[in-house]
């Protein structure tokens, strides 16, 4: 895809993220790897107002094109691309249940086999750091090596995948898992978990299963 097409795809992903109920207001941001850097949503702009021209190019050194302001979270988007050569798209949001679980500062444990969607047997939760900081990007860089979906404590979710469709799909799946987890926690009962052996079987099966949408 050329820059214009990728920019359109970023905007469509943002709009779909809102339609799916995964975001509100100007929260969240979306990027794709592009040339020696990435294309990313601008900061603080309602998705409905975005046009292809608003999407910002940021190079691998963090230098952005003049006259445009990239998302305040450009550091952690770049950190994801540096940490993982197997992903080319990043979605960040403040979806209700992911943000709620992130406040517990704990990973989502394997209460359901779909927890394996991120590539490990839990959805990690990285420590809190102020939005838009190098510190947050450092935490993201470590966390995303472990799983393609991570919770950001007291903040929200990051999902990284091979393309935007897959990244959005992953973000949606994790929001559903977080919703189930919140319901389970609300019962006050002990939550039975799948053991490591069962999760290892699913993780292996997931290597050859699933969405195969190429951009
Ligand atoms: C304060 C921001 O909303 C922050 O939470 C950031 O993480 C976010 O989600 C949206 O920031 P941008 O509009 O700068 O992408
Ligand atoms: Zn955010």
Image (cartoon, rainbow, N blue to C red):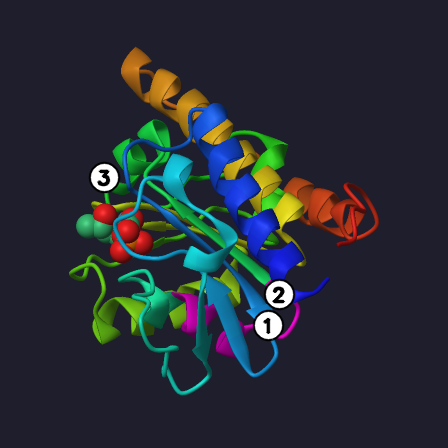
Residue that numbered label 3 is attached to: 104
Residue that numbered label 1 is attached to: 34
Q: CA distance from mark 3 to mark 2?
A: 39 Å
In contact (CB < 8 Å): disc 1 and disc 3? no
* Disc 3 packing (10 Å; few <14; some 14–19; many ≥20): few
Q: Residue at x 61, y 38 (%)?
A: 169
Mark 2 or 1, nearer chain start: 2
Q: Residue at x 40, y 35 (%)?
A: 48
Above or below, comparing residue 8 to residue 60 in the picture: above
Q: In front of the other: label 1 or label 3?
A: 1
Indicate whether residue 14 is drawn in magenta: no
Instruction: Tell me where residue 159 appears, x and y as whole percent.
Output: 50, 50
User: Under tag 1, what secondary structure?
Assistant: strand
Indicate whether residue 85 is drawn in magenta: yes
Report whether 82 appears left or right of 97.
Answer: right
In contact (CB < 8 Å): disc 2 and disc 1? yes
Residue range highlighted in magenta: 77-88
Residue that numbered label 2 is attached to: 3
Q: Residue at x 37, y 46 (%)?
A: 107
């Amino acid at each position: 895809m050329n820059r214009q097409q990728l920019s359109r795809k970023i905007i469509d992903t943002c709009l779909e993220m809102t339609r799916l109920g995964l975001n509100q207001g100007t929260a969240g941001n979306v990027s794709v790897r592009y040339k020696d850097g990435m294309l990313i949503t601008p900061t603080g702009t309602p998705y409905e107002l975005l046009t292809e021209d608003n999407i910002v190019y940021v190079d691998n050194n963090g230098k952005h094109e003049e006259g445009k302001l990239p998302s305040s979270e450009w550091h952690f988007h770049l950190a994801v691309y540096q940490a993982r050569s197997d992903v080319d798209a990043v979605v960040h949001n403040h979806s209700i249940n992911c943000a709620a679980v992130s406040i517990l500062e704990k990973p989502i444990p394997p209460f359901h086999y779909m927890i394996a969607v991120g590539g490990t047997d839990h959805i990690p939760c990285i420590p809190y750091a102020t939005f838009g900081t190098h510190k947050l990007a450092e935490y993201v860089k470590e966390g995303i090596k472990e799983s393609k979906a991570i919770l950001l404590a007291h903040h929200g979710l990051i999902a990284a995948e091979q393309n935007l469709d897959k990244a959005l799909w992953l973000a949606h799946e994790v929001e559903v898992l977080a919703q189930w987890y919140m319901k389970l926690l609300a019962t006050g009962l002990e939550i039975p978990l799948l053991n490591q052996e069962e999760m290892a079987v699913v993780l292996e099966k997931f290597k050859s299963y699933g969405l195969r949408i190429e951009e």
